[in-house]
Amino acid sequence: MDFSELTEKTRSYRRFREERTISAGKLRKMISMAGMAPCASNLQRLRFSIVTDKKERSALFSGIGWAGYLADWDGPEPGKRPSAYIVIHAPEEHKFFTGIDVGIAASYMVLAASAEGIGSCMLLNFEKGAVDSIAPAEGYTVKLVIAFGYPGETVKLEKDSEKIRYWRDEKGVHHVPKLPSDSIILKG
């Protein structure tokens, strides 16, 4: 699969096949790929926690908001929840580039997951206390939680749309609109 196909295949999934576990080796490989990502001044400040224990996943799940545009949906029901999470931590001291480093590292991880047939969802809507209780990291703060699992839903890319709000149709297919390339290029 070429990179273009990989980027089109890499979507945010919010329903998974929870019974299918992801090996520790695959999760560690995703983190390894994040460690290869470029970062500001090559400081390599980010740290990662893997959460796979069923009780810990359940506790973490309760502190996560799942889909802002689907206001009447509280997230996936049991059996359709992620089988793993990776938490990205950064030093507590604020540096302007930290968010950029987190985004790049997260992108590497979700692309690596997608290449393995694993779905993901980057989650910024979380209760910090819930995450800290499951994945404590002294001297670090939680910046992002990524859910991983084998996809349990169909996600359809809607290319060249003028809309930005994703939606689910009557069959449960999750539609993700993307603006036309010409509308996002300012010059050139």
Image (cartoon, grey):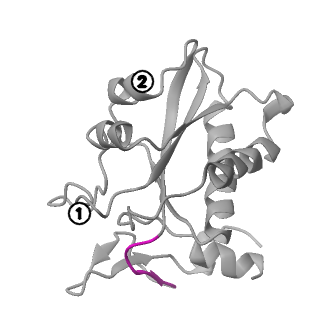
Hey, which residue is sitting farthest left in the picture? 72
Q: In the displayed structure, does residue 182 sit left or right of residue 159?
A: right
CB atoms at circles 1 and 2 under 8 Å apart? no
Q: Residues in magenta?
A: 151-159
Above or below, 100 against 158 in this view is above
Q: In the displayed structure, does residue 21 sit left or right of residue 140?
A: left
Asked which quadrant contains residue 75, the reply is: bottom left
Q: Which residue is pictured at 38% across the width and 73% down the height? A: 152
Query: In which quadrant of the rendered image does the N terminus lie?
Result: bottom right
- CA gap between label 1 and label 2 equals 26 Å
Percent x, y for residue 110? 61, 58
How many residues crowd mark 1 within 10 Å: few (<14), some (14–19), many (20+)? few
Mark nearer the N terminus (1 vs 2): 1
How many residues crowd mark 2 within 10 Å: few (<14), some (14–19), many (20+)? some
Q: Secondary structure at mark 1?
A: loop
The kind of residue tagged 1 is Leu
Tell whether position 125 is magenta. Answer: no
Asked which quadrant contains residue 19, the reply is: bottom left
Percent x, y for residue 28? 68, 46
Percent x, y for residue 82? 40, 56
Q: Which residue is pictured at 51% across the width and 85% down the height? A: 160
Percent x, y for residue 7? 65, 73
The kind of residue tagged 2 is Asp
Q: Which residue is mark 2?
A: 132
Q: Secondary structure at mark 2?
A: helix
Disc sitting over residue 70 in the figure: 1
Above or below, 99 against 27 in this view is above
Q: Which residue is pictured at 19% across the width and 60% down the height? A: 73
Asked which quadrant contains residue 111, the reply is: bottom right
Q: In the displayed structure, does residue 36 sit left or right of residue 14?
A: right
Query: In which quadrant of the rendered image does the C terminus lie?
Result: bottom right
Q: Nearer the viewer, residue 114 or 180?
A: 114
